Image: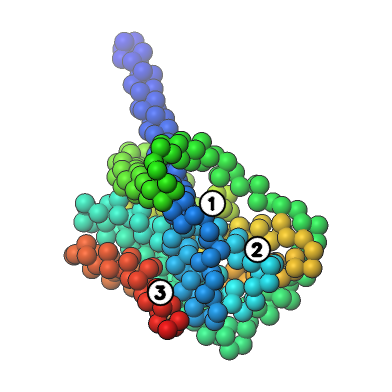
């Protein structure tokens, strides 16, 4: 009896120790995933000579602005970077009516990251279907929001007028730069430096950039595969209950969770990239992921708002105005699409159909990513220029 009793603590301790190590592994893998996403962005910046502003040189009308914002964000892999650049350009004289479509395009382009992350499940048909639908519901919502709000903005300028009315109350002429509050950037800088050093021996910036992109994609494929296996062992019991209480309780709770996490990491790409593997592993379904991604759309606006605080002088109000446009675009998009029942189901329906096609034939994935984010916008820009 006493022998049996004395063995109980050891038996109880072993699972607890194993669970703790599993969580350490999860945190490590998440860090690697974020570093991989960052490596892809750094690689594109390096390969293009870090001349991101030149991507906007052709933005001569709202339609071209939309396409350029989309392409630029898809290339740079960071809507935070693009929106911060746009805020600075508005402060430097870029017309608001051109900047607004650029912001809308950035909202679409940022959803590419989570779509790339979903490819980590490409070898498992059912997991890939779940992951791909969770990733593309973000794309579908953002595209639908642009289809509705861009024509309204061109005709009546509701975003511009609403932001203009509030910008004077929010803007400060003291120019307090709050961008240094980006804790995530500081945390990832060692990994960024390490990966940058690993390719520094290559002959030029273009080769270094391409190599970083390849390394980043390879890391994503490895991490997503590994994290799915580990999450199945740790997402049980209380841990699973906590996640479901915050994300799976209902749409309002899901949006709040997505917004809060995105504000903390200052990147919607990062947040949606974290939820996609969970969806692929079956922890969350599309109905739960959908409002979570909408919350990330609102949370990512913090970057442009923080960037606007760095602008001082007479253009500070203009900078704050375009930052607020970014916020109102996402808020109005949710109010129109998610609150209206006949529109609410369109993004999940599109995402589900895309996932079924992708599961059936992987060429659909290549056509979707290449077509929506690169080929179609570039063809339309070229046609417009001609």
Mark found first going from the N terminus, 3 or 1 = 1
Mark found first going from the N terminus, 1 or 2 = 2
When the figure is inspected, residue 127 is found, relative to residue 355, above or below; the finding is above
Circle 3: is it few (<14), some (14-19), or many (20+) Cα within 10 Å? many
Where the N terminus falls, by quadrant? Answer: top left
Image coordinates for residue 141, horizontal then vertical, percent: 44, 71
Residue 241 numbered mark, or none? none
Name which quarter of the figure residue 7 lies in.
Answer: top left
Q: Residue at x 43, y 39 (%)?
A: 200
Residue 377 numbered mark, or none? 3
The residue beneath circle 1 is 261
The foreground one among 64 and 328 is 64
The residue beneath circle 2 is 88
Name which quarter of the figure residue 183 lies in.
Answer: top right
Where the C terminus falls, by quadrant? Answer: bottom left
The foreground one among 201 and 138 is 201
Q: Is residue 266 left or right of residue 281?
A: right
């Amino acid at each position: 009896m006493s022998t049996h009793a004395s063995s109980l603590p050891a038996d109880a301790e072993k699972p607890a120790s194993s669970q703790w190590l599993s969580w350490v592994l999860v945190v490590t893998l998440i860090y690697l995933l974020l570093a991989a996403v960052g490596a892809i962005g750094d690689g594109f910046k390096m390969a293009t000579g870090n001349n991101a502003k030149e991507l906007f040189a052709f933005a001569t009308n709202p339609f071209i602005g939309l396409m350029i914002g989309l392409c630029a964000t898809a290339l740079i892999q960071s809507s935070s970077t693009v929106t911060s650049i746009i805020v600075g350009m508005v402060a430097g004289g870029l017309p608001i009516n051109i900047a607004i479509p650029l912001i809308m395009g950035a909202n679409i382009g940022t959803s590419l990251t989570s779509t790339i992350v979903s490819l980590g499940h490409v070898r498992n048909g059912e997991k890939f279907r779940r992951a791909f639908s969770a990733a593309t519901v973000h794309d579908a919502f953002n595209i639908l929001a642009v289809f509705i709000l861009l024509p309204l903005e061109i005709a009546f300028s509701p975003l511009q007028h609403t932001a203009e009315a509030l910008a004077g109350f929010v803007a400060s002429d003291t120019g307090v730069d709050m961008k240094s509050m980006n804790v995530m950037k500081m945390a990832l800088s060692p990994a960024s430096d390490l990966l940058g050093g690993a390719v520094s021996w290559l002959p030029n910036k273009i080769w270094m950039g391409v190599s970083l992109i390849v390394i980043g994609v390879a890391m994503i494929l490895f991490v997503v595969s590994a994290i799915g296996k580990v999450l199945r062992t740790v997402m049980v019991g209380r841990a699973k209950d906590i996640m479901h209480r915050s994300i799976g309780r209902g749409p309002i709770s899901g949006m709040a969770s997505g917004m809060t996490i995105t504000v903390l990491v200052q990147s919607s790409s990062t947040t949606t990239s974290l939820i996609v593997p969970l969806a692929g592993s079956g922890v969350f379904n599309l109905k739960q992921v959908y409002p979570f991604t909408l919350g990330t759309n609102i949370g990512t606006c913090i970057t442009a708002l923080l960037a606007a605080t760095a602008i001082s002088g007479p253009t500070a109000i203009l900078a704050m105005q375009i930052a607020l446009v970014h916020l109102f675009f996402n808020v109005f998009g949710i109010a129109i699409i998610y609150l209206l029942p006949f529109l609410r189901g369109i993004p999940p329906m599109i995402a589900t159909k895309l996932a079924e096609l992708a599961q059936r034939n992987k060429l659909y994935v290549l056509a979707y990513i290449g077509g929506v984010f690169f080929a179609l916008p570039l063809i339309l820009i070229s046609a417009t220029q001609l």
